[in-house]
Image (cartoon, rainbow, N blue to C red):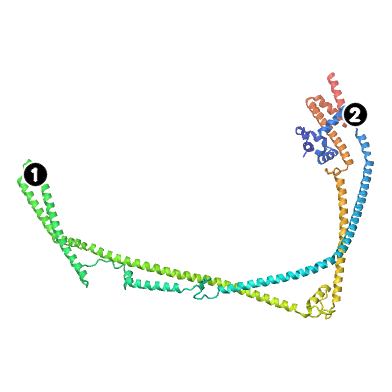
Amino acid sequence: MNPGDRFVQTLQKLGYPKASKLDGEDFDWLFETTDAKKFLDWFCGTVTQQNVVSDEKLKAFNQIKDSGKALLDEKALDEVMKTFKPAESKAREEVAIGKLEEEIQSLKNLRSLHVQRRNKLQMMRSSNVHSHLKLKDREDEEARSLKKTLNDLQVSSNKLNHELQTVVEGIQKLMSFYAPQEMGSMTSPIFLFQVLLDKYLSCEEQSTNTLTLFTKEHFFEGLSKCIEGSENDFQLVQLDGKGSNNPALEEKCKEMMRLQLTYISAKHKLIQAKAKRASLGTGLQWVESNASALQSMDVNKDKLKVRIASLKEESSQIESHIAAINRDSLPALVRESAQLLNMPVVKGDYDEQIAHRNLYLSRQDLVCDHLMKQKASFELLQLGYELELRKQRNVDQQLKMIIQDLRQNAEKLEARLRMMSDDTLLSADKPRTNVDSKDTSGHGLFQLLDGDNTQKLFRTYSGLESVAAKLAQEIYTVKNQLAVCEQEQSHLLSKLEADMKSLQDFMYPDGSELILQTPEVSTNFQHLHGNLDKLNQILLEFLEDLKVKRKILESSKFDKLEKQIYIYFFQNEELLKTLVKSLESQTEVHAS
């Protein structure tokens, strides 16, 4: 990035209002040297918006400037800055004095803390004396509480006896539930197995006998075979009477044969009458249709005779055909038609058989319903017995568990009673000095306090008391060490709190705003900000003047030449002299 662009971007970050109108290429010539580049790096990396002069300060500066008061230049400003060095050393001394005062204050706080602890210890001593005086009263209280405890134990014992009696009564009542019911007992049964089923079984037996009699009365032997073969029984019965020993069936067959013969003859006569009637009707129609034609025109007799002869032959052929039909096919057809007369009789016979069979099926359904009800009642009774058996098994398991627990508790109680009845635990008339070898609790307590796991035959109660006193002394020593540690910790905490308070007072002098620098440094920064604002104003004026001059140079060649002459005058005087001489010679040439 070009130096001019960096400079313009920094001005934009600082919030310069006319920075968008500036062009970075216009400032490239300012930063060609090494010092200028260092200044640009410092300016772009250090200066922030905090270094920008606010409008109020700028107005105040302009007012001072317009008022005609003297402004400090660079040398005067350096002399003024030198005056701040003694003030800085003085500030350091004040800080050291402040630290010493804070340390004194912390020591005072520590002293007050020690005084408070001393007072606290005195109060503890007085409270200990007071508690020692109260111990006698407490001893009397303990005696009274012991007596009261004995009375409470007596009451609880009576209550326990009452509860045990209640448990016994409950067990007796439970046993009475499982007692067998007598025949004349008025009490209602509790369980299903206690219910007497004699009446129910007798009723079921009577019902079974009645059903058996009903079946024998309304069902005939071989009904099952008839029902099983019912699909092949429905066939047309031959009513010729052959091979039948039933007289009613023979009479029925004869009657049907007479009806067949009567029907055949009547049908034959009817067919002949219908044929004659049809022939007569056909002849009359022909006569009616040809009568008018015969009367109106002259008929040729020869032709007429020929026509009559042909008609006679046709009629004879028709008659022979009719006779053949009457002789051959008509009787067979009439017989087949006659055989159909026995169908209503057969249908009636089969309707009667179907009615009988439906009656048998209805009675069978009635018997099946009764049997299903009887079976359902037996299955329901069986299910009730199975459920009750399962519940009784669960109750039996629970009772067994209760009995097992009671036996274990009884064994524990017996062991405890045996231990309490031990002679070593009873108070003797003369106090013992040695711990009994059977006193396992005493030996275990001695090993716990002494830390010696070796088995010793002779241990005394005085040794046990000395070990207990030693343990109490060690506990007291540990408590004192803990108290000392607490004091040291409290001292460190108080010192740390004092340091924190001093740091907080130093960082928050006003109590609300955090200060990260001293007043002297802030004053120097303010002067530096003022100088930066002045430098910024000078740079802006210089840039504006530079733009104006560049425009003038671009518009006027004479001014551009004048600039070059000034450059030669300050940088290369010999070249300037050479140019002046060449110009003078040129002017002389033009003048001549």
Label of residue 291 in the image? 1
374 shown above or below 75? below
Write the residue at 42% across / 68% down.
373
| Residue with the most extreme left position | 301
Q: Is residue 562 visible?
A: yes
Q: Identify the residue under disc 2.
A: 69
465 shown above or below 354? below
Q: Is residue 539 visible?
A: no
What residue type is disc 1 on?
A: Ala
Task: Find residue 98 and report its horizontal and vertical position in percent.
Answer: 92, 47
Q: Is residue 504 left or right of residue 420?
A: right
Label of residue 306 in the image? none
Image quadrant where one finds the N terminus: top right
Write the residue at 88% across / 39% down.
523
Could you say which is closer to the camera, residue 574 or residue 545? 545
Could you say which is closer to the camera, residue 414 or residue 156? 156
Write the residue at 60% across / 74% down.
172
Q: Badge 1: few (under 14), some or many (20 or more) residues near its Cα, within 10 Å?
A: few
Q: Does dot 1 land on a helix, a strand or a loop?
A: helix
Q: CA distance from mark 1 to mark 2?
A: 170 Å
Could you say which is closer to the camera, residue 498 or residue 196? 196
Q: Going from the N terminus, do you reach mark 1 or mark 2 first?
A: 2
What residue type is disc 2 on?
A: Lys
Answer whether labels 1 and 2 touch (C-beta < 8 Å).
Answer: no
Could you say which is closer to the camera, residue 526 or residue 273? 273
Task: Write down the quadrant of residue 414 in the picture.
Answer: bottom right
Task: Write down the quadrant of residue 481 in the picture.
Answer: bottom right
Image quadrant where one finds the C terminus: top right
